[in-house]
Amino acid sequence: MDNKSAFNKLKNIFHNKYLKGDGKLFSIVFFILFLLIITGIITEHYIDYTRNNWKSIISEKNNETINIIKKEFNEKEKFLLYGLEKLKYNLNKELSGSDDVFRFFIKEINRKDYDDFSIQIFAPNGKLIGWNQNQKFSEDDLFPLPSLIGETFFLEEDLAFYYSIIDTFHFQSDEFFVFISLPIEKKYRLYNEYFEEISIYNSITNKIQTEIKIDFNPFTSNTNDGNKYSFELLNNKEKKIGLVTFETPKLRDEIEKIRNYSASLQSIIVLIGLLIIAFGLRSDYIKINSLVAKFLFLTFYLILFRVLIFLFAIPSKFIDGEISDPSNYSSTFGFGIVKSPLELLVTNIFFLVICSQLFRLTFRYIKSDRKIKNVLIKVLSVILIILSYPIVLRAFASSLNSIIFDTKLKYFKDFKLLPELTVLIMHINALLIGVSFLFVLIVLFLHLYKILFHNKSDFKVIYFLINVFIVSVPIIIFFSLSKNPLYNFLTLFILVFSIGLICYLIIEKDFEVIKYYLIILFLASVNSVILLNYFDTIRERNSVKNIAFEINRLNEQLIKFYIDDVISNIYSDHTEKRFLLRKDINFNALAFNYWTKSNLHKEELNSFISIYDRYGKKVGEFNIGIEAKENIGNIINKFQDVYYLNESNIDSLNKRFSTYQKFIEQGVTQLIISSGVDFEVNKLGKKNYPDFLKSELNILNQFVNLEKVKIFQFRNNNLVQLYGDVYPNRQQIKLLFETKLDSNFNDAWIQLKFGEEDYEAYLYKVFENQDEILNVVAVAKNKFSWNLFNFFKVFILHSTFILILIITIALFRVKRIKISFKSKLFLLFLFISIIPITILGLYNRNVLNEQSANNIINDLKQKSNLVESNLMSAYAKENLKNSADKVFRALGISFNLYDETNLLYSTNKQFFDIGLMNNKLNSLVYYKLFYDKFKEYYQIEKIEGYQFYSYYKVINIKGKNIILNVNQAFNKTENLISTTEFDIVLFGIYSLMLVIIIFASTILANQISSPIQKLTTAAKALGRGDFNVKVQHNVKGELKELLDGFNKMTDELKRNQIELTEYEKESAWKDMAKQVAHEIRNPLTPMKLALQHLMVTFKEKRDEFDKLFEKVSTTILNQIENLNQIATEFSRIARMPSLKIEEFDLIKLLNELSSIYIQEKISIKIISDLDKLLIKNDKNQVSRVFINLIRNSIQASSKTIVIKINKSINFLEIYFEDDGKGMTKEIQDKIFIDNFSTKDQGMGLGLKISKKFLNSINGDISLISSSEKGTIFKITLPYE
Amino acid sequence: MTKQMTLKIIFILSIIFLENNFSQTDKLIHNFRSNTKSESINIIISEIEESIKQSDVLKLSQFINAQTYFSLMGNINGYYTTNQAFYILEDFFKINKIQLFKFNQVNNEENNPYATGTLYYESKGRKNKAQVFVTLKRVGESWIISQLSIN
């Protein structure tokens, strides 16, 4: 790092000179800002236009609304007609070619394809001959025909409105009537998972966002008064069948809509603008050298981004539903920046990006040589880190605590392995929070270590432990003094251990970065899940408190409020009131419809709604757990309008209230409507409630399974109410009374034991009418298998998310990601282990499911046998109804009796009376028992979405065949182990097995792949020219032979290489000598001839001697010049081979070289400010220089090599430092001399050649120092 | 205006502001101490009435804690934390715009204080009314809403 301070760097960033960014992108940003302004102006203009042209706009809007509504109805009609055509076609097809006509007939109309329809087939004489499980209409509904054949119409039934059609089909010259109906509007509503909502009203109002009224009869007249608009609904033959009235749009609402659209558009524009700014500043960001400045820049931008999109309500404005519902999660932290699961997710993503960047930059800083020099800053940093550590830990726990408490979601009570979207998002939130905070905690730890122990070149465990100790002490003090520490010892220990482990791996080991991230992700998941589980245990505890509040919440006023609410709803719903006076009303169904929409159902109260005629005789009722009076004739005259009846039993804390309200028309009482509630602790839960009527809004069952709960109520120290199957013994009662309660809240917690199970009990005292009531709510502690299930359920979800993330990244960076041989082996082991386990698990589950089903059927069979035998004996003395009542009272078993197809008797008759269950026997059952002559038959039936087994048996009573039906809907069956419990145990154990398999696979894969890896790196080193490489191993068998063979091969190669080199040298010299001789001979020959000629001329004293002498001298001089040139040429050839210059990344090269020696148990660290360093040089030669130095260090028993690269103006200064045994002074002087070596092997040319090469490129190598502690070489390379 | 004058004006305004606040606080404390417990229940109920009328979630949230049971239109049933309650109420008032509200019946007995009333609101262009039921409970020295029903 240069000497410029971080502050100066930051200043430079914001100086105009540097902050240029991409001009084009910033132009787009200005354009976007301009668009924002334009949008606002256009919006106002559009609003003015709307105001001025409102009349014509209204007419257009009305038409739009009409089209939308008509489309909804048309779609329903189309579906109905499609069902009809399909049925007719299939009936014609099946029946015409069939011998067993009736069988195919029944089979066809009971097919799943028609589950949405109610189908009735009538014979030509009007007799009902076939129906499906949704049969609603009888012969009375057919004749007189409610509509013409082939025309659709609306039909009102007790519980719903239907779109219907009657048509005919011909078979064997007879004409049969097909009456098919599609429900379009249910009159009732159930607050549970089984309810199948059918409401055309809701689907229309959700689309048009305005109030509508649908009249399903053709006789209502239109209303068009400016505020409301009506239009007729026409059927497939263009005849009026109904009327829809809707509120005409208001100008005020339209203007608000326009403003909302405009605001949404502006939000999108702002988002795009912010993204473009990010791209525009990217180039500036990359150029920043200071890590601190880089981090601050990014953090500032991300915070600004998040705040701005929050202010513009992105993404909540665009995404509605459960994930934006604050009841699923919200917190007031950050002014609402986490006010829903979706907002929390968005905030978490930003937070994670900031934390991961912090970690990334810290990682680089830790691996670099940089340090804080200023002592004051060091001291302040240490203090800040020590103080902030416990605060960050607490913030982490608080965030997860909020995820558990500030929500109504059940993370762990829900047994589904694949959760709903909202729950899934919250799990991901928990993971993201875990990862982010873990990054921060690791960063703080690493910074502390760097500040305190930077100067220590060797890593020692003692330094690390001191660091851990310094960090742990304030944590322990902080949490010991804290009233609500949010951790227990175990959770804190695991977290601190995880942080320590990761920091140790970062400091001491040198993994690939991706491995560190993976480890952090998984450890974050483990810690998050453990904490979530811990807080959930606390929440379960708190929900026990809620149970105590609940059983005291219901007082006289509240019950009166609920009852009054029910009755006023009945009156306000039918403004004409004449509806209640219709003779054809099914008052039972009416009572049920209102009961389901009231708080009586929502809170699963034992309650009733009943209707009486003017004389006080009951004409209709729906009740659960409490029956209304049959006759109230004795109290009618006691009141004018409303009468409250309090039948509570104060002694037993039973609360029983009812209200009677007269419906008076023209001064005459027409009807009396009544509602009542009976509340008692021992009647809590689903004892009286069939499963299909349970309510998800009932607090009592929301977070704790009521079956695990025991409740006791003491009134003035006497036990008056009990829920559960145990009584507290004398000692326990004494303990309850002697426990000291909190003075403010009047509550306390104690431990109890019932049988072998431990319970945690909450005591809560209230005062009511001078009485002291002590409420005790005890819940069984979770078994280990539950905790295991809870842990793995979320951990596997997190792991799946992490794996998907990694695979996604891998897909984008496919060229860079290489799956090593070790990873392939690991995946293979995992794959072949998981498959049989999964198959086994699924098989076991299947077996258990079958076993459970068999248990249920057997149980129903046994019950039916009991009923049959008791009925036989009872029927001998009394009529059927009385004997059946007797049998029910005696056995407590619910059953139904059918006389061929019609219901004769039912212990739950009210469900048949209201129409929720059919009075007609299922036609398939009828066929099986009467045509196929089965003695018994069972099938799965359903009420709404609730499925149950239903068992049928033909019994003979007094010579008459009657069908006895016992079903699971009203008879609870106990399994030894439920499917859910089995799932929990299975899932927990199999998850544990999966973890063991992963560990075992890792170890095995490592054992097999490690020698192969060593071989690969050794081969690479050999390829680079390092013939001294050896593979160290301790394997056995074939691998041993392979590795030993390789070592032998390298020895051979080395020997051959030396011999070859010698031979080549010799050959080269010989060739050169020949060449030299040859080349020298060339000029010598003419020299000799010329001299000989001169000598002859001299001897013969010829006249041309002078001329010849000159000529010969010139010749000789030329040839001498030739010889000189020859000598120069040969001298040049004898120099080094020619260089091959290329551009390459020096840091990458050094990293590659260090990976070659990874098996040599030597750590090679490269220290540089830069990630990349491009130089132009001979890559092979440079590589040989470092290979040579590394090899020398290894041979000098070094454990660590540090290569530091410093950039200077035109040079790179590379310091090569090892911790080997060093060299003596005498040796130091000779290391660059030819053929000098301290080793047994080698020619002693390595350093000499290196020096020669470096000198040839204007670089150098020199020895800086050498001692017992190590040796330092300095290499300079030219650099531009 | 000179700089000195501006500073003086600011200083005087600050004094007035602070003095006003402290004096109000004294008055409030004095009022609170001198009222009977029944009157304080009445005050709390009227404050609750005011906050519902004005859809003032912040004001209403002072009377809410983790022991408050909510039963609101739109399937809100149960005990919620103060964090959740804030935004649940905020959303509720956003969807159902309050036109008129008044408590018809108030019982200020200390052992069982409650109030019922009728709420007129507009939602999705339709005017409607709902029944409101509020009960109070004493927790330590203060009163909190133990149940808030709007159905």
Image (cartoon, coloured by chain):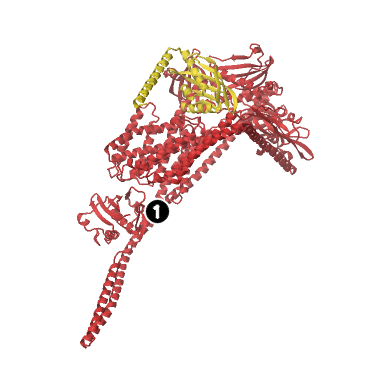
Chain colours: A red, B yellow
**Quadrant (top left, top right, bottom left, bottom right) of the C terminus of chain A:** bottom left
Does A1232 appear above or below B31? below
Foreground of the two, A715 or B77: B77
Q: At label 1, which amino acid type do we have?
A: Ile
Residue A116: x percent and y percent?
A: 65, 35
Which residue is at the far front? B1
Please state which of residues B137 and A793 is positioned toward the viewer in this rendering: B137
A568 lies above or below A637: below
- Residue furthest top as drawn: A638
Name the one closer to the observer, A448 or A180.
Answer: A448
Observer able to see residue A415: no
Badge 1 is on which residue?
Answer: A1012
Q: How many marks?
A: 1
Residue neighbourhood size for the residue with mark 1, other residues' Cα within 10 Å, grouped as few (<14), some (14–19), many (≥20): some
Residue furthest left in the image: A1226
The answer to whether A983 appears left or right of A1011 in the picture is right
Q: Element type at marker 1? A: helix
**Residue B56 in view in this figure:** yes
Q: Dividing the picture into quarters, in which one does residue A666 lie?
A: top right
* Residue that protrudes farthest toward the right in the picture: A173
Whether A192 is drawn above or below A1015: the answer is above
Image coordinates of residue A577 in percent, x first then y, are: 67, 21
Residue A31 image point, x, y percent? 48, 42
Residue A903 picture location, percent across and down: 69, 28
Does residue A942 appear to the left or right of B18 in the view shown?
A: right
Chain under disc 1: A
